[in-house]
Image (cartoon, rainbow, N blue to C red):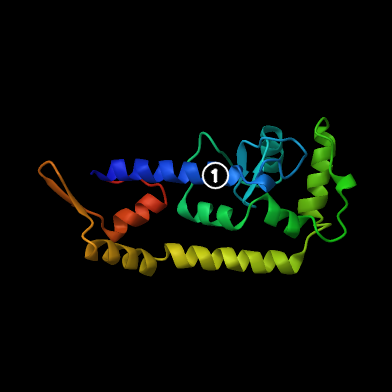
Amino acid sequence: MTSSILLKKQEEMNARLVRDLLRLPENKKCFDCPIKSPFFVNVTLSTFVCTRCSGLVREVGHRVKSISASKFTGPELAALELGGNGIASKIWLSCGYNTVDTPEPESDGEVRGFMRQKYYERKWLNYDLAVSHDLAVKDKINELFTESSICFLYYRMVSLGNSKDVGDQHWKATPQMIMRSIYNKTYD
């Protein structure tokens, strides 16, 4: 099995995980407006957003990826698994928030105003929860994706005999190959 095949399989597993997270009830509606069926991930907040709001959150400096056309890295997936619209609501829309404040989907201006209140003014932000969640995400990413944990995974794979003969080649995963696959980088 070549490294490009492994990378392709990892990308397929990552895409499947994002689609599975999208199917959760709290993620079936855009985080920034009441439109159903979000098709984008706000990578900055680890939330699911609709097409229109994907453009609007870019205006406030957030990074956005298309669910169908983008590749997600291991750390992005870990953050998304710990995040999602349910957790983000508890963080960004908890302190004094009233659902009446949610804009109607017809008006970009209202959605922009709502985003300004939410992201710039931090009107409803639960700061303590935001800090603790951010630390939990960083801890999880460090646990999963530091070089020592990758080396542990590598040596565990080797000890279990994870090697395959491919034609005349003998392939074994190296820690560097695993790291590159996690971060979606190509290698030979």
- How many numbered tags mark residues here? 1
The furthest residue to the left: 168
Residue 79 percent across, percent down from the top left:
56, 56
Quarter of the picture holding the N terminus = top left
Q: Is residue 168 left or right of 145 when viewed as pictured?
A: left
Q: Is residue 99 left or right of 133 when viewed as pictured?
A: right
Residue 39 percent across, percent down from the top left:
62, 36
Q: Is residue 61 visible?
A: no
Q: Answer above or below: position of 9 versus 95.
A: above
Q: Quadrant of residue 153?
A: bottom left
User: In what element is the residue under mark 1?
Assistant: helix
User: Residue at 68% of width from left, 57% of height from top?
Assistant: 87
Q: Quadrant of residue 110?
A: top right
User: Residue at 82% of width from left, 58% of height from top?
Assistant: 124
Residue 144 percent across, percent down from the top left:
44, 63
Neighbours of disc 1 within 10 Å: few (<14), some (14-19), many (20+): few
Residue 113 percent across, percent down from the top left:
84, 43
Residue at mark 1: 20
Query: Label 1 sits on what residue type?
Result: Asp
The residue nearer to you, when weighing 104 against 65, is 104
User: Residue at 27% of width from left, 61% of height from top?
Assistant: 157
Q: Is residue 19 left or right of 162 when viewed as pictured?
A: right
Q: Quadrant of residue 100?
A: top right
Q: Is residue 59 visible?
A: yes
Quarter of the picture holding the C terminus = top left
Q: Is residue 28 left or right of 137 when viewed as pictured?
A: right
The furthest residue to the top: 106
The residue nearer to you, when weighing 177 against 120, is 177
Q: Answer above or below: position of 94 versus 99.
A: below
